[in-house]
Image: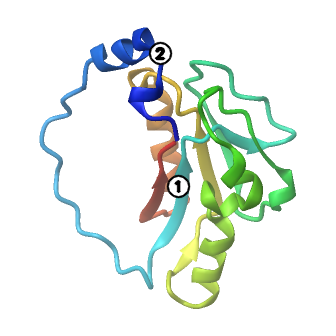
Amino acid sequence: MVRLKDLPTEYAAHLLSLPIADYGPSPWAEAPDLKQARVAIISTAGLHRESDAKFAGGADDYRLIPGDLDYSELTMSHVSVDFDRSGFQQDPNVLFPLELLRKLEANGEIGSAASWHYSFMGATDPTRMDETAGQVAKLLKEDSVTAAILIPV
């Protein structure tokens, strides 16, 4: 992970000048009992199946990742040159813990793993993702997902 102090001065200044959105107060939502929860993974690591289109810089779309995915099909097209991919290359669970989620389900620690999981490109202005975030919310609801593991990259 690159630190702000290690970036070129102009790049660091640009990042520090970006506005921080105020989303107002968050409504309180009770957490589900994990033993009954249906859990999905949502990542911003730019992950996708090799057969899917790669993410481009500034992409505001997402990729569907099936719950029965074999990790050999998973690849990353994250556009940040400062992103260290070595952890993901050694163990995909670092950025997409689907194997671990399956173990939690098998051990009865969660109700079930979702049928579909989702990946976005993290190097994108999040205000551009309003529409696609709404689409994913609808898909999560249709899949009866009651909890999500959010993996920001």
Q: Report which quarter residue 85 is drawn in.
A: top right
- Judged from this view, the residue extending furthest toward the left is 25
Q: Where residue 10 sits in the image (x, y, percent)?
A: 41, 8
**Label whose residue precedes the other's in the sequence (1 or 2):** 2
Q: Secondary structure at mark 1?
A: helix
Q: Is residue 53 left or right of residue 109?
A: right
- Judged from this view, the residue extending furthest toward the bottom is 107
Which residue type does callout 1 highlight?
A: Glu
Q: Secondary structure at mark 2?
A: loop
Kindly indicate whether the residue at mark 2 contacts the one at mark 1 (C-beta within 8 angstroms): no
Residue 108, label in figure: none
Front residue of 6/61: it is 6
Which of discs 1 and 2 lies nearer the camera? The answer is 2
Q: Report which quarter residue 59 is drawn in.
A: top right
Residue 8, label in figure: 2
Which residue type does callout 2 highlight?
A: Pro
Residue name at image x 14 percent, y 36 percent: 24
Q: Which residue is mark 1?
A: 142
Front residue of 85/102: it is 85
Q: Vertically, is 11 above or below 21?
A: above
How many numbered markers are drawn?
2
Residue name at image x 60 percent, y 43 percent: 119
- In space, the residues marked 1 and 2 are separated at their CA atoms by 45 Å
Q: Where residue 135 sits in the image (x, y, percent)?
A: 51, 37
Q: Is residue 150 left or right of residue 68?
A: left
State the scheme by which the image is colored: rainbow
Give neighbour class at mark 2: few <14, some 14-19, many 20+ (Cα, 10 Å): few
Residue name at image x 71 percent, y 49 percent: 86
